[in-house]
Image: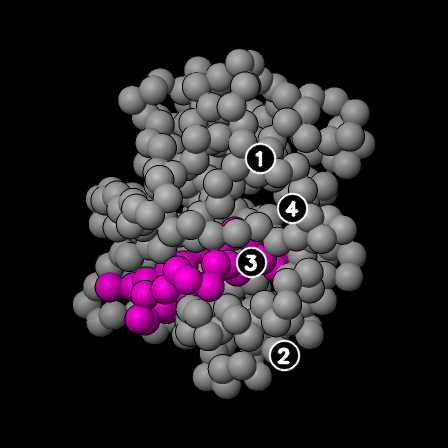
Amino acid sequence: MFFRPDDLVLRGAAGRPPVTVRWLGTAGFEITCEDHVVLLDPYVTRASLTRCITSPLAPDLGAIGRYISRADAVIVGHTHFDHALDVPAIAKRTGARVFGSRSAAALCHAAGVPEARVDMVERAPGQTPIVRELGPFRLRFVPSAHSRFALGRVPFPGDIDDCDAVPVRAEGYRCGAVFRVEIEVAGRTIVHLGSAELLPDEPAPRHVDLLLLCVAGWRSGVDLPERVMRAVSPAAVLLSHWDDFFRPLHAPVRALPAVGLGPLAERLTRASRDVRVGALPLLGDLFL
């Protein structure tokens, strides 16, 4: 299931700057091009299940220092704790701009991130998706959906609009608006789907080189693999959010119970025989 060493280079545009994609565990990625770094849903604290149940959650500043060296932008696809907990601390440490929903902005403001470095990209109903440019990156924030894996419901639904201090407990990290993030950089197009669901009426780019696909809860959606392939049609799929994120990053990787990577990969490749499907080891790199 992991990409083999020979597969870790996907054919990019000739003569264009290289692009490196690093998996940070869970739905988190680091994308680097031309000395610019964009982080997607970075979560390296990886609090234990016991801590998530019993205590308010605070970012592990030691883990952030070990695994996040720099960032120009941090993108928050939605605001559950395993996507958003570390974002304010990373922004304060690196000086990065944060792009996210009203809920993400509320978390950042409560944690003391300067308002000028928080960009709320949640669109009003009926508006076109918001686009931002940062160095070689063009970022498009498309409305998406969260998988309904909790007895047919989205876990911790609603917005974060009353957060006047952090840390808060896991259930306080309500979902907020959900984005599919489309990234154009150096002639490549990367799509980050941070939850295993999507909206049918939001068209994707005509050519997608790499889909970063969250798989946690994928079985709760009807025909999700087939719908994803029809909607996005990527050349390659990198599976994420299949790992047990209650274990620290330095521990051996372990899959979430019953995540079903094999059946998922089989259905993705059956839907599009030309697609390459795989996963990376924790902190592993893929070169575009």
250, above or below 196, in the image:
above
Residue 250 located left or right of residue 123: right
Q: Which residue is mark 4?
A: 154
Camera-nearest residue between 205 and 25: 205
As helix, strand or loop, the secondary structure at mark 3 comes to: loop
Disc 2 to disc 3, C-alpha distance:
18 Å
Q: Nearer the viewer, mark 3 or mark 1?
A: 1
Amino acid type, mark 2: Glu
Asked whether the residues under the numbered discs 3 and 1 touch, taking CB atoms below 8 Å apart as contact, a structural biologist would say no
Q: Earlier in the sequence, mark 2 or mark 1?
A: 1
Disc 2 to disc 1, C-alpha distance:
34 Å
Q: Quadrant of residue 260?
A: bottom right
Magenta range: 187-216
| Residue sitting farthest toward the left | 15
- Percent coordinates x, y for residue 176 in the rendering: 52, 37
Q: Which residue is mark 2?
A: 266
Q: Residue at x 25, y 70 (%)?
A: 13
Location of the N terminus (image quadrant): bottom right
Q: Nearer the viewer, mark 2 or mark 4?
A: 4
Q: Earlier in the sequence, mark 2 or mark 3?
A: 3
Badge 4 crowding class, 10 Å Cα cut-off, few under 14, some 14 to 19, many 20 or more, is: some
Disc 4 to disc 3, C-alpha distance:
11 Å
Q: Which residue is mark 3?
A: 197
Q: How many marks?
A: 4
Amino acid type, mark 3: Glu
Q: Which residue is mark 1?
A: 158
Tag of residue 167: none
